[in-house]
Image: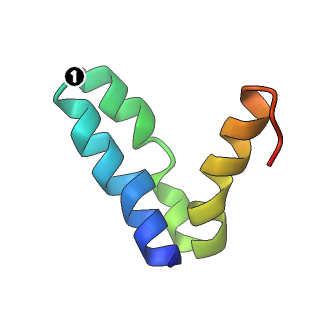
Amino acid sequence: METKLINFWWRDLPIAASRVSGFLSVILADGIYLTHWSKVAAYAPVKLNGFYFGSPI
């Protein structure tokens, strides 16, 4: 499960975004270093987006 989330957040999503904007792809891939800590890499984007948009998960 964590591997799928990590691949989505740090590989698939930036690749898909590169079709729209190269800069957006770089922004989304900026946290790739987090993949060394699998739980953080898998769940931090979800938590941070929830806090950013005002709806904590």
Q: Quadrant of residue 34?
A: bottom right
Q: Residue 25: x percent and y percent?
A: 31, 33
Nearer to the camera, 35 or 13: 13
33 horizontally vs 15: left or right: right
18 relative position to 10: left or right? left
Q: Amino acid at mark 1?
A: Val
Q: Position of residue 4 (x, y in %)?
A: 41, 71
Residue 32 lies left or right of residue 37; in this view the side is left
User: Residue 43's x, y, as percent?
Assistant: 64, 60
Residue in the picture at 16% in, 29% down: 19
What residue lies at 37% left-to-right and 64% top-to-bottom?
7
What kind of colouring is applied to the model shown? rainbow
> Nearest the camera: 34 or 45?
45
Say how many tags the image has: 1
Q: Up-down: is 16 above or below 34?
A: above
x and y percentages locating residue 11 in the rendered image: 32, 55
Secondary structure type for disc 1: loop
Residue visible at 24% across and 21% down in the picture: 21
Q: Residues within 10 Å of mark 1 (few under 14, many from 20)?
A: few
What residue is disc 1 on?
Answer: 20
Q: Would you place residue 14 above or below residue 1 in this image?
A: above
| Residue at point 50%, 78% (across, down) | 1
